[in-house]
Amino acid sequence: MTTPIAVVTGASSGIGAATARHLARAGFEVLCAARRADRIEALATEIGGRAVVCDVTSESSVAALASAAGPRVDVLVNNAGGAFGLAPVAEADADEWRRMYDVNVLGLMQVTKALLPALVASGAGIIVNVGSTAGRSAYEGGAGYTAAKHGTKVVTETLRLELYDQPVRVCEVAPGMVHTEEFSLVRFDGDQARADAVYAGVPDPLVADDVADAITWVATRPPHVNIDELVIKPRAQAAQHKVHRTS
Ligand code: 8X3
């Protein structure tokens, strides 16, 4: 039997890297796609996968990813994304908003478009888009990111409608608070104290492995089962704003 192929974007750290590891354990040959070559090469060696340097916001880079993937792809995890800044709308930085739309929406569209023929060719493809609880609610300072993640959600829903007669499932896994090494650090431009404050006193925020486990579960259901959306939060986060903190 041929080994099924999975492509994971944003695989250099956090949820993407953890998902690549989980999918490899589940029997996939994983193409680890991200901009940072050293990280994905080490990961690919560790899991017996392949590293493909890819910037999802660049059309030529995405075309190179599609040709590296080849004629058949079974699973696509559109994980590349991120938040930049937490300024209120009155002080918003248009460049930060553009970058968020670029990576969370346009990047996802470009990779999906490029890999769609190979997903169809598999006869039972699946696309798992990594959304967010930020795609379901609003919070102060979050508008640039929440708008982009609402975009991720709506693109997912649209694609499911458009592919209704094709052998490709379209799913979204939407995490809440996940303590990864980089998400908040990137959002706050390297300010470690501000990043740490996001998770301060929260008993057991989710970690990347928790989300990778959910993505892998969604991706390994039988081909007729479409998990439209799966929202995953730590027990301490009852809602976006309602977070239990012990200190
Ligand atoms: C991350 C969730 O709460 O930082 O996608 O917007 S949040």
Image (cartoon, rainbow, N blue to C red):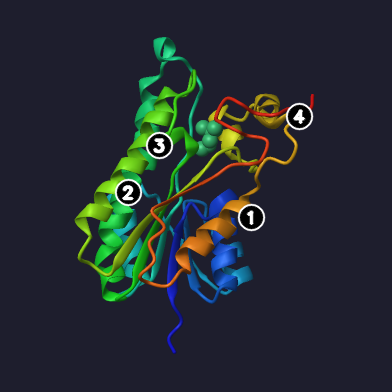
Q: Residues within 10 Å of mark 1 (few under 14, many from 20)?
A: some
Above or below, 111 relative to 192: below
**Amino acid type, mark 2:** Thr
Q: Which residue is mark 2?
A: 156
Ligand 1 neighbours mark 3 (CB distance < 8 Å): yes
Crowding around mark 2 (Cα neighbors within 10 Å: few <14, some 14 to 19, many 20+) is many
Query: Alpha carbon of mark 3 to alpha carbon of mark 4: how far?
Result: 26 Å
Where residue 16 appears, as percent x and y from the top left, is 53, 54
- Contact check, label 3 and label 4, Cβ < 8 Å: no
Q: Which residue is mark 4?
A: 201
What amino acid type is highlighted by mark number 3? Lys
What is the distance, in whole Å, between disc 1 and disc 3 at their CAs?
21 Å
Q: Nearer the viewer, residue 27 or 65?
A: 27
Q: Earlier in the sequence, mark 2 or mark 4?
A: 2
The reply to whether residue 160 is visible in this rendering is yes
Sequence-wise first label, 3 or 4: 3
* Earlier residue among tags 1 and 4: 4
Is 195 placed left or right of 9 in the picture?
right
In space, the residues marked 1 and 2 are separated at their CA atoms by: 23 Å
Please give the residue where the numbered disc 1 appears in the rendered image: 209
Q: Which residue is at 79% across, 27% downward?
A: 246
Give SS at disc 2. Answer: helix
* Residue 95 x/y as whole percent: 37, 25
In the rendered image, the quadrant that contains the N terminus is bottom left
Residue type for callout 4: Gly
Residue at coordinates 35% horizontally, 70% vertically from top-left? 224
Marks 1 and 3, the one that precedes in the sequence: 3
- Residue 92: where, in percent of width, then height? 41, 16
Asked if the residue under mark 4 is in contact with the one under mark 2, i.e. CB atoms within 8 Å, the reply is no
Residue type of the residue flagged with mark 1 = Asp
Residue under circle 3?
A: 149
Farthest top residue in view: 90
